[in-house]
Amino acid sequence: MFSFHPAARSVLLVAICLLMSTTATLADEAFEDPWRLDPIASPDFQSVDLVLDPGQREYTGSTRIEMTLHEDSDRFQLQAFEMDIDGVTIAGQAGQFELTVEEGEEALQTLIAPQVLPAGTYVLSIDFHNDYDIRATSLYKVTAEDEDYLFTQFEATDARGAFPCFDEPQYKIEWQIALTVPAGDIALSNTPVEETSTVDGMQRTLFMRTRPMPSYLIALAVGPFELVEVEGTSIPTRIVTPKGKAHMAAEAARNTPPVLAALEDYFGRPYPYRKLDLVAVPEFLPGAMENVGLITYRDTILLLDPENVTVAQKRTLSSVNAHEIAHQWYGNLVTMEWWDDLWLNESFATWMGHKITNEVFPEFNLKVTSVRGTEGAKDSDTSAATEAIRAPVMSNSVFESMDASITYMKGEAVLAMFENFVGEENFREGVRNYINKHEWGSATGGDLLDDLSESTGVDFHTAMGTFLDQPGVPDVSVTPLGDGKVELSQTRFSFIDQDLPQEQPWQIPVVLKYSDGKQVREHRTLLTGPSEIIELPDGANPEWIHPNSEEMGYYRWEVDPAQLMEMIAISVDEFSPRERVALVSQVSAQLRAGRINGGDYLAMSTALMQDPHPEVLNTALGNLGEVRQAFVTPELMPAFRSWVRQNVGPAVELYGLTPGEDEAEGVSLLRPSLIAWMGNWGEDPEVRLFARQVADSYLQDPDLVDASIAGACLRVAAIDGDWKLYNAYKKAFEAATVPAERSRYLAGLGRFAKPAMQDAALALALSGDLRPQELFTIPMGVGMHSWEQPDRMWTWFVANYDRIIELMPPQFKTYMPFFAGGCEEERLVAAREFFAIEEHQAPGQDRIMERVSEGVIECADLRRREGPTVEEFLLDQSSR
Ligand SMILES: [Zn+2]
């Protein structure tokens, strides 16, 4: 699954609408807990036959499960969630019996026979009927542009909401699906069609039997789809779009063949299944989901306006596509035995998604930008509430509140660090051996580490284990001792005033980059103890040392502040863009650790903002959002505004407000941030006027505007916008047929400054007319804009709580404490009281509350501690 993740505390609210969480029913010790199936019975094969009319509210189905009863028993379990079971029979050597159903906790159903059944094989048949879900979970209904569709999203535990099954990942069996749908609709599933027939005026499609797969990877789609054939792949491949959208599939059709080919090359074996369909889904909670042979995507990712596609859109499509297709081997062909190895799936797919995109489309510069994800993970991982990558999944609450930045981004960074250390080819050999050894079956993280150890000669269990099994970020300090000797030592990185437990030392692949005065060299070592003195091979006293070459190591590093300032001074000449992007975050981490003060931080940030690589400035702007949130009071706003103009203005001059011909991709990616910063916080009249002109043109005809600046301009134009503009956005939002246009107008609607328009936009958010993944876009926009009233969104949230709960997918409830995020301690007190009330609670919410509290307290402390130095710096700057 591709999950958007919360990057930093200043955007905590983002998590609400973007982070995909899953409902789960899990436990620590396999088979000894109340959430998991009793292993007395297991499935061998399952067929599912559903009658699905998207025009109706409910459906009927039957399923037939060939199963083994491992001991004599009169009862066994499977899972079915909130459906009506109409009849259950079992047939085997002892005859045929009706079973009764005893409903238990967590969708566990105990099926009870009238007598003890001897161990052996049986055929279980169940008839049932059920309502479609309408909030993008399990088997759900979507009405888009007056057409009805059905889609599924089963990971982790929602297959049981569509049909009864053994809904745990270790049960990899063959399946056969049959769907009976209205004539004229298209039915799709994981495999190609075996045969079609007509039943009572409807069309029945029997799909080919699958290869072994777990229930969470089953997918179904029904509706008036359009199909676009993709040329140049090893198996039949199609892009599947809702009615009237086929023309927006061109970019996906172009992107898929080279990505698929690069993955086949990496794994050294062809795509494992018989076909590949990529489906655009209008209502979808995660970014995308890797169902076997039928990958589903949020429509905004897959369907792009062929006339006006941006670099950012192409890059997202490519890395999400590579992530999901990589899962076809890694996760699907070989599946984790249990959810505590979810990192195996997601770290690997995230790493592969970036690696393959970077290989196939180097122009997207993902090697440089992906380090921002790693830096964000380091911030999350410094929280006292962080968890190890490989954490036991003990209950649904653990799963609900899983931190995607750890499971996805930290996991990716750790894989990349070790790959870099042992060499790409050795690492790949281990991965290939792992896939070949466990094909069609299940495996654990330990199995992968076995194969990597064998192919590389490095003990991965011990070395990588120190990163997988303990939380936190190592901090490596580097002290030159003279005569080519350098002392390295490690502790756990912490922000000031944190008292984090120190566990065992990490085994850190440290790669130093240094200059001996003649040339730049690298020195590699595995730092295994608390400290170690190494000797640089040439014995020279280096002119400078970068403690983390190419920032490939998952660690923070420490040098003294004067040395850090010197590193910034030589960064453009000596360091790579990737190292400079990470330097921006390193500086921010030093502020939070209390090693530099607010004034130093802004001075260093100002210096880094002069970097000629657009991605460095883009990263610096991202971090400044945190400065604004923590420090900028209404009184300080004029000084902050002038500082923004001084430092962002030159880049606007240099790159221009409109895209140039053949400009570098990085510049196109930076420009929207420049417009947003100058328009919002720089309050630059020229940029605001420009944004308004662009917004007017876009409203007239979106093709008149370069899509890369459209979103930023719509948001900036809204700040001074009147009712006429508001109503124009709303009308255009409702009429939009291109997914990105719809998103841009929606985001714009949340940015009007006048309170009455904000009220109207917030009412729209609760009108019931938005899609589940769109619910929080407007509140987020209003929250960012109404910075003079930091409690505004919290007040709105509390006042409208019942309506919000009614509209949003139930699994979002876990994340509601994010509404209390920010820097206000009083609000935190109110939030603690609010979420202490039993009916406001949800599984995993305590952990989210803990993270939010920590962020608020840290921000408030930072404000108290560094507010005066920041103020002094800004006032001094603006008086010049
Ligand atoms: Zn994934």
Image: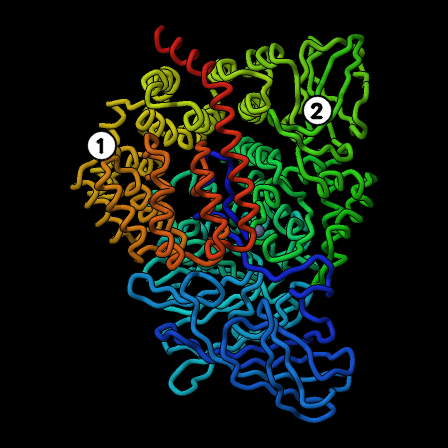
As drawn, is 559 to the left or to the right of 250?
right
Amino acid carrying mark 2 in the image? Val
The vertical placement of 574 against 745, above or below, is: above
Q: Percent from the top left, x then y, of residue 687?
A: 27, 25
Q: Percent from the top left, x then y, of residue 847?
A: 57, 46
Under circle 1, the secondary element is loop
Q: Quadrant of the C terminus?
A: top left
Q: Which residue is mark 2?
A: 476
Amino acid carrying mark 1 in the image? Asp
The vertical placement of 438 against 710, above or below, is: below
- Whether residues under marks 1 and 2 lie with C-beta atoms below 8 angstroms apart, the answer is no
Q: Percent from the top left, x then y, of residue 617?
A: 46, 23
Asked whether the viewer can see residue 305, the reply is: no
Identify the residue at image location x=19%, y=40%: 725
Q: CA distance from mark 1 to mark 2?
A: 48 Å
Q: Percent from the top left, x then y, of residue 711?
A: 33, 38
Q: Which residue is mark 1?
A: 720
Identify the residue at image location x=56%, y=51%: 844
- Single out the residue that lies furthest toward the bottom: 95
